[in-house]
Amino acid sequence: MVSYKDLGLVNTREMFKKAINGGYAIPAFNFNNMEQLQAIIKASAETKSPVILQVSKGARNYANQTLLRYMAQGAVEYAKELGWENPQICLHLDHGDSFELCKSCVDFGFSSVMIDASSLPYEENIALTKKVVEYAHQFDVTVEAELGVLAGVEDEVASEVSHYTKPEEVVDFATRTGCDSLAISIGTSHGAYKFTPEQCTRDPKTGRLVPPPLAFDVLDAVMEQLPGFPIVLHGSSSVPQEYVDMINQYGGKLPDAVGIPEEQLRKAAKSAVCKINIDSDSRLAFTAAVRKVFWEKPAEFDPRKYCGPARDLMTELYKHKIINVLGSDGKA
Ligand code: G3H
Ligand code: 13P
Ligand code: ZN
């Protein structure tokens, strides 16, 4: 058993309380490699933003959980080296799909876990979430749960349509499970294709797709039911068109990739939404930078020469999100 407290990590409880009271959101950035982690920590340290490092089941399998834990521990030390005296860093399991996986992460030094049982029938979601909460809380590890299903792919769970969270269920769910935060479905989805062209309109000037607005009425109704309760938004990449253009310009093929407009995320961050999940934007930045080097310097074969620019672009992206979208700068 490894306690996250010994690794210098924190759980989400205080972070979320301050974020809700302060009208900003904590960035939850996924990572699975060193360059992403360096970029996240550099951006967070330079802006003094609390941060959630997210590890999905896939990332855990990809990078090895022992390595990931030491990387998170190293991240705390790296943050201090960068002059961040009291780093507020949480290590979080993203989309845990079983009690065993969540338990293993709690036992292995994670400070927060998500149990995503949103694809199960309501009562089964409650039962599984409650079981994870009861285990995790013994070690002061916080638990995120989910109600409602996002469109697209939720790890292995495929869903073609978005089932918005039912506001009338949230009080019963939060009370009976004891979860610390709740991910809800209001129209966001995972990946770089969040809406089909048919669901969007086109800006006549630029020809770009303009997505439909998020269901803020559902968010408002949830907040009315659960005043001050921490709400989480998954699938919140904005799919920056400059990265999509770079990827397409340098040999890639991502036609009509579209995300959540940043002004909608800004609005959400000011509410009880206190954790905003971003993964795809980082993947796009990484890929765009690597493609550019490969295109311009086909003879280059030193990974530092293409992973370095990728890291720089991701750092810029994370800082932009922290300062201009989530408003979490200067909060840690
Ligand atoms: O919500 C999903 C995250 O973007 C993680 O994706 O399962 O491919 O690592 P992944
Ligand atoms: P994006 O695919 O929009 O980056 O969402 C990431 C996410 O929700 C991770 O859980
Ligand atoms: Zn997610």
Image (cartoon, rainbow, N blue to C red):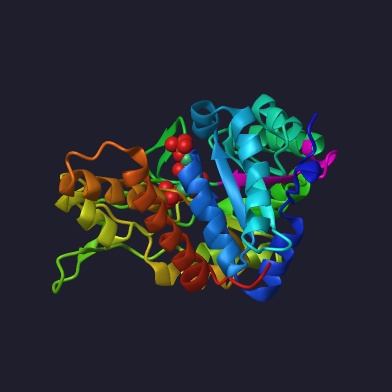
In the depicted structure, whether residue 228 falls above or below residue 127:
below
Give the number of marks: 0
**Which stretch appears magenta?**
136-147
Q: In this orientation, does residue 149 appear?
A: no
How far across and how far down the image is residue 88, in percent?
Answer: 69, 58
Toward the right, the furthest residue is: 138
Image quadrant containing the N terminus:
top right
Left or right relative to 253: residue 233: right
Give whichever of 23, 224 is nearer the camera. Answer: 23
Q: Is residue 244 left or right of residue 137?
A: left
Left or right: where does residue 293 sit relative to residue 56? left
Q: Using the image, determine if residue 114 lies above or below residue 326.
A: above
Tell me the residue at 65%/28% (across/down): 101
Q: Quadrant of residue 107?
A: top right
In magenta stretch: residue 284: no
Q: Is residue 21 visible?
A: yes
Q: At 61% from the left edge and 57% from the top edge, which residue is drawn?
A: 51
Q: Quadrant of the C terminus?
A: bottom right
